[in-house]
Amino acid sequence: GLLMRLGKVDKVIVGTDRVTSDAVFNKIGTYLVALAAFDNNIPFYVAAPTSTLSLHETIEDVTIEQRDSREVGNILGKVQIVPNGVECLNYAFDFTPFRLVSGVITEDGVFTPEELLKKYTA
């Protein structure tokens, strides 16, 4: 975010694991990067092979994987770094709504979310 604020970033390109009709799903933290880009008027692009397109689905259709809480509550699975009784959540992915996506890059070209839906759901 700081580099964006300082004008050191002219665009953001991330990958994706899945693209639905209203969002892209990628590793946890992608949504925050998209928000920072949006707030700093920086284009946010998603590299998405067509094999990741699930345009018949919506955000509500996707279950986001939760991983073992010990991955974030312990160091090397041995040293506990959170107080007893604290529940850690460890989601593997998040989603970025299309309103934050400037373009989706596929092997067929670069498309706005609207163009992507039109091309691949027609």
Image (tube, rainbow, N blue to C red):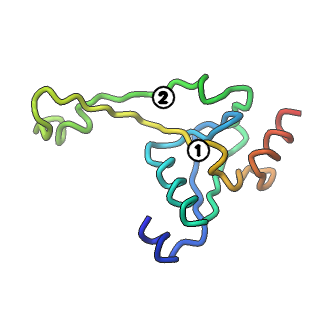
Of callouts 2 and 1, which one flags the residue occurring earlier in the amino acid sequence? 1
* Quadrant housing the N terminus: bottom left
Residue 65 pos. (x, y %): 44, 28
Residue drawn where x is 26% and y is 36% of the image: 71
Displayed quadrant of residue 58:
top right
Q: Is residue 99 left or right of residue 119?
A: left
Residue found farthest to the bottom: 7
Distance Cα–Cα, label 2 vs label 1: 14 Å
Q: Is residue 9 left or right of residue 29?
A: right
- Local packing at callout 2 (Cα closer than 10 Å; few below 14, some 14-19, many 20+) is few
Q: Amino acid at mark 2?
A: Ile
* Quadrant housing the C terminus: top right
**What residue does disc 2 label?**
64
Residue 87 pos. (x, y %): 23, 28
Residue drawn where x is 71% and y is 34% of the image: 21
Residue 105 is labelled as none
**What residue does disc 1 label?**
16
Residue drawn where x is 58% and y is 62% of the image: 12
Residue drawn where x is 10% and y is 39% of the image: 79
Q: Nearer the viewer, residue 17 or 20?
A: 20
Q: Amino acid at mark 1?
A: Thr
Residue 47 pos. (x, y %): 65, 52
Q: Nearer the viewer, residue 9 or 107?
A: 9
Compared to residue 114, the image places residue 66 above or below, namely: above
Residue 52 pos. (x, y %): 66, 37
Displayed quadrant of residue 117:
top right
Assign a secondary structure to mark 1.
loop
Give the total number of marks visible in the rendering. 2
Assign a secondary structure to mark 2.
loop
Q: Is residue 26 left or right of residue 29?
A: right
Displayed quadrant of residue 18:
top right
